[in-house]
Image: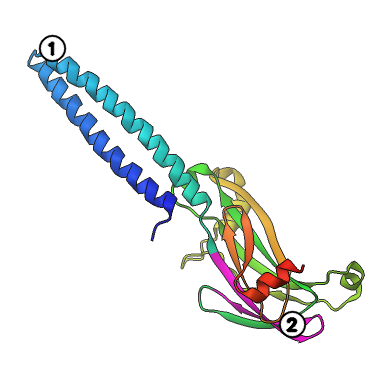
Amino acid sequence: MPGPYALSTLIALGAWLILAVGALGLLLSGLKGLWHRHLAGGSFKICCSAVVGGFAAALAGIGLVLHTYDRLTHEQAAVTLHFEELASQQYRANLSFPDGQFQSLELHGDQWQVDARILRWTGPAIIAGMDALFRMERISGRFADLGREREGPRSIHALPSGLAEVENHFDPWALARRHPNRFPWVDAVYGSATYLPMAHDAEFEVVVTQTGLAARPLNDSARRAIRDW
């Protein structure tokens, strides 16, 4: 089901089509009248065509703004995390990915962190419907205490990439890095990370937006962990 901004965009598009067709009809009718030397009627219809065309242009601008906003607020699911406490500052993280992959691993610390690389597009590419691409890199455990973070056990694990690739292994990430001047629609290539506290039975979702990674709690245990953080 389309979101409110997507629905508004469709309504604006429908109204624009009606006005555009009406403006074109009036213009053709007015030109026909002038051709047959009906100067008053033809001129009036052409003036009406200009007015209706102006409304159509205004609606097109509104629709474009709404469509752009809807693309900017679009989210892509990256991974869902569920934690089981094994011991003090030791957790099992169960990761579920949108493509059906599953990963179970151990993390040490008080917090989890997910890192990814993001390829973001410029305005025209967003308007065309291109979402930010992402490459998942790793998940790691973090200790809240800096001393413990320096000396405690490290737990870092690689994650399967979420970067979309076609069958011939076309890699837009690599092309954007190698030929930045040839791809003006690429806005930025950068790293993004998000982290939140770990807790027993806590479940979180990580999504990719047009500006980077974002994480949110999915159950009460996760919300309590954030509240007590």
Q: Around disc 2, counting alpha carbons within 10 Å, would you say few (fewer than 14), some (14 to 19), or many (20 or more)?
A: many
Q: Is 209 situated above or below 13?
A: below
Q: Is 30 situated above or below 216?
A: above
Q: Which residue is rendered at x = 51% and y = 78% of the image? A: 100
Q: Which residue is rendered at x = 90% and y = 70% of the image? A: 150
Q: Position of residue 91 (x, y in %)?
A: 74, 82
Question: Going by the picture, which residue comes out furthest to the left?
Answer: 36
Residue 16 appears in the picture as rendered: yes
Q: Which residues are magenta?
A: 77-97
Which quadrant is home to the C terminus?
A: bottom right
Q: Around disc 1, counting alpha carbons within 10 Å, would you say few (fewer than 14), some (14 to 19), or many (20 or more)?
A: some
Answer left or right for 98 relative to 82.
Answer: left
Residue 126 appears in the picture as rendered: no
Q: Position of residue 205 (x, y in %)?
A: 60, 69
Which quadrant is home to the N terminus?
A: bottom left
Answer left or right for 30 relative to 212.
Answer: left
Mark 2 — residue?
91
> Which three-letter amino acid code belongs to the residue tagged 2?
Tyr
Labelled disc at residue 161: none
Q: Which circle, 2 or 1, is nearer the viewer?
A: 2
> Which three-letter amino acid code belongs to the residue tagged 1?
Leu
Q: Which residue is rendered at x = 73% and y = 75% of the image? A: 198
Mark 1 — residue?
39
> Is 208 a magenta residue?
no
How far apart marks 2 and 1 lie (CA) works out to 83 Å
> Is 84 a magenta residue?
yes
